[in-house]
Image (cartoon, helix red, strand yellow):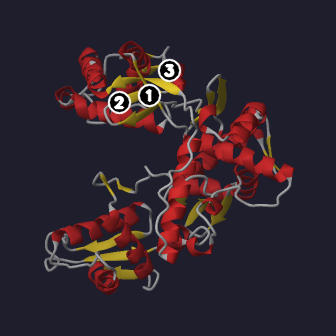
């Protein structure tokens, strides 16, 4: 491995791997806490990391005493994005999102230590002043939502439990108490907002690159950075899903993108007829798990099933969906600010979106059940009893990787799925007991 030139600084060849690990930690998590080795690496390579993240991705590195945060432009409004409490496997609903905002405001006003009861007392009047929200400690759903917020903040490193006489506060707030330590450095990293909504003239103006009167060179640079951010996030980018100018640039600049992303992340950019895919050189998709086993098998069998079904769907591109969502957000904003009636005119979509083969959801479920049965020797008893849950999780993995799209009653495999058709599933004799739910030995994957 050769030395890496990052900005005006050179990272020695022997340290490039550590530099790329620090970069991946920031890109994968956006917030890196001082509880592990990754934070030490970010501190060590602060200057070259900041230079390369800014040059390649247009992102800014903030480094505090106890955490590092990657701040990056907003490229899209993701209607599928959900905050999730990993400890309980629950996604945030509107009540939890509202309580989160109020709790963050409350934490900014306390010292380094606060009790759960005092924090609840702080946010209660704010919640009661908010129409259709409220916070009543006698209502278990309210208590459970509040505790989920604190669990999520604990997972982000904003709060940590110092003492808990009883962890069942959500069942009975009179039965015990929890004492929290507040990390104000992490709190600031989580709460500092992007451009204020009330200062933006439109929803589109909040997105990256929506600035008028910039030079052609700067516009090209921002487009290249936006494509690089998409590749880091998805990691498959289809040309059909890009705006026309971005699609032309992605084809023309693929070599430059490959060079920059390989140096920054250690990952390889593959160029295919349908788009670009950023692939890790180790631990590639799918990650070793039971759901990954099924997802890998679906990459071979699902496209064949879709072609045999005879079903085709015309699917708007991601660029068209983005435009429609932005227009809808601006109509809602107009109603909220001025009270004007909503314009019933639908947002413009491409007149002839591409048609893609699709499989009926019921047939896809049958396919998953057959895959589970054929690979039953490598799966746990719980998975064999509930193939539907395994299939849902496998399709979630594929959708997150940009390999399938789902609509009511249909599953649509995307062309990039062809990359994994040659993959095979193997299993050597395990030396340890059968894995728990969600885990599988790494030997299950071979590509």
Please give the label number shown on residue 291.
none
Mark 2 / mark 3, whichever is N-terminal: 2
Q: In which quarter of the image is residue 392?
A: top left
Q: Is there any visible trace of residue 30 in the rendered image? A: no
Q: Are circles 2 and 3 on residues that touch, CB within 8 Å? A: no
Mark 2 / mark 1, whichever is N-terminal: 1
- Percent coordinates x, y for residue 182 in the rendering: 43, 75
Q: Are circles 2 and 1 on residues that touch, CB within 8 Å? A: yes
In space, the residues marked 1 and 3 are separated at their CA atoms by 23 Å
With 395 as the anchor, is 191 left or right in this view? right
Would you place residue 118 above or below residue 192 in this image?
below
Q: Are circles 1 and 3 on residues that touch, CB within 8 Å? A: no
Instruction: Give the labeled residue for mark 2.
Output: 410
Instruction: Give the labeled residue for mark 1.
Output: 313
> Which of the pair 257/10 is nearer the observer?
257
Instruction: Give the labeled residue for mark 3.
Output: 420
- Percent coordinates x, y for residue 145 in the rendering: 27, 67
User: Few, some or many C-alpha atoms within 10 Å of disc 1 (few <14, some 14-19, many ≥20)?
Assistant: some
> Which of the pair 74/339 is nearer the observer?
339
Q: Residue at x 22, y 78 (%)?
A: 177
Mark 1 / mark 3, whichever is N-terminal: 1
User: Few, some or many C-alpha atoms within 10 Å of disc 2 (few <14, some 14-19, many ≥20)?
Assistant: many
User: Few, some or many C-alpha atoms within 10 Å of disc 3 (few <14, some 14-19, many ≥20)?
Assistant: some
Q: Nearer the viewer, mark 1 or mark 3?
A: 1
In the rendered image, which quarter contains the N terminus?
A: top right
Q: Which residue is drawn at 20% across and 74% down?
A: 165
Q: Which of marks 2 and 3 is in front?
A: 2
Q: Is there any visible trace of residue 286 in the rendered image? A: yes
SS of the residue under disc 3:
helix
SS of the residue under disc 1:
strand
SS of the residue under disc 2:
strand
């Amino acid at each position: 491995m050769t030395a890496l030139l990052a900005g005006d600084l050179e990272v020695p060849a022997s340290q490039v791997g550590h530099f790329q690990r620090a970069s991946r930690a920031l890109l994968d998590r956006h917030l890196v806490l001082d509880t592990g080795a990754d934070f030490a690496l970010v501190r060590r390579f602060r200057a070259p990391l900041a230079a390369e993240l800014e040059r390649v991705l247009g992102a800014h590195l903030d480094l505090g005493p106890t955490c590092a945060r990657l701040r990056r432009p907003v490229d899209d409004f993701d209607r599928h994005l959900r905050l999730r409490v990993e400890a309980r496997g629950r996604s945030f609903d509107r009540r939890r999102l509202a309580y989160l905002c109020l709790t963050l405001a409350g934490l900014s006003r306390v010292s380094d230590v606060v009790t759960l009861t005092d924090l609840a007392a702080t946010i209660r009047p704010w919640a009661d002043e908010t129409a259709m929200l409220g916070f009543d400690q006698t209502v278990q759903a309210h208590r459970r939502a509040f505790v989920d917020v604190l669990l999520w903040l604990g997972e982000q490193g904003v709060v940590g439990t110092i003492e808990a006489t009883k962890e069942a506060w959500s069942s009975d707030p009179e039965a015990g108490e929890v004492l929290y330590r507040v990390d104000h450095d992490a709190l600031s990293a989580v709460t500092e907002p992007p451009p204020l909504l009330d200062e933006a003239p439109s929803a589109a103006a909040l997105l990256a690159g929506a600035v008028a009167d910039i030079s052609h060179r700067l516009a090209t640079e921002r487009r290249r950075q936006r494509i690089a951010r998409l590749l880091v996030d998805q990691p498959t980018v289809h040309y059909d899903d890009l705006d026309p100018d971005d699609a032309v640039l992605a084809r023309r600049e693929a070599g430059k993108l490959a060079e920059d992303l390989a140096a920054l992340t250690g990952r390889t950019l593959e160029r295919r007829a349908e788009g670009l895919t950023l692939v890790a050189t180790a631990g590639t998709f799918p990650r070793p798990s039971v759901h990954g086993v099924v997802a890998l098998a679906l990459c071979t069998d699902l496209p064949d099933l879709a072609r045999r079904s005879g079903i085709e769907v015309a699917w708007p591109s991601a660029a068209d969906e983005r435009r429609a969502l932005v227009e809808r957000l601006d109509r809602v904003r107009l109603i909220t600010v001025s009270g004007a009636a909503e314009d019933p005119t639908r947002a413009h979509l491409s007149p002839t979106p591409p048609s893609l083969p699709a499989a009926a959801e019921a047939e896809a479920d049958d396919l998953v059940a057959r895959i589970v049965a054929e690979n039953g020797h490598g799966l746990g008893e719980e998975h064999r009893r509930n193939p539907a849950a395994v299939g849902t999780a496998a399709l979630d993995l594929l959708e997150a990787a940009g390999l399938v799209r789902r609509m009511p009653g249909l599953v649509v495999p995307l062309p990039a799925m062809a990359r994994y058709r040659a993959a095979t599933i193997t299993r050597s004799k395990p030396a340890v007991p059968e894995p728990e739910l969600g885990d599988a030995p790494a030997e299950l994957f071979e590509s």
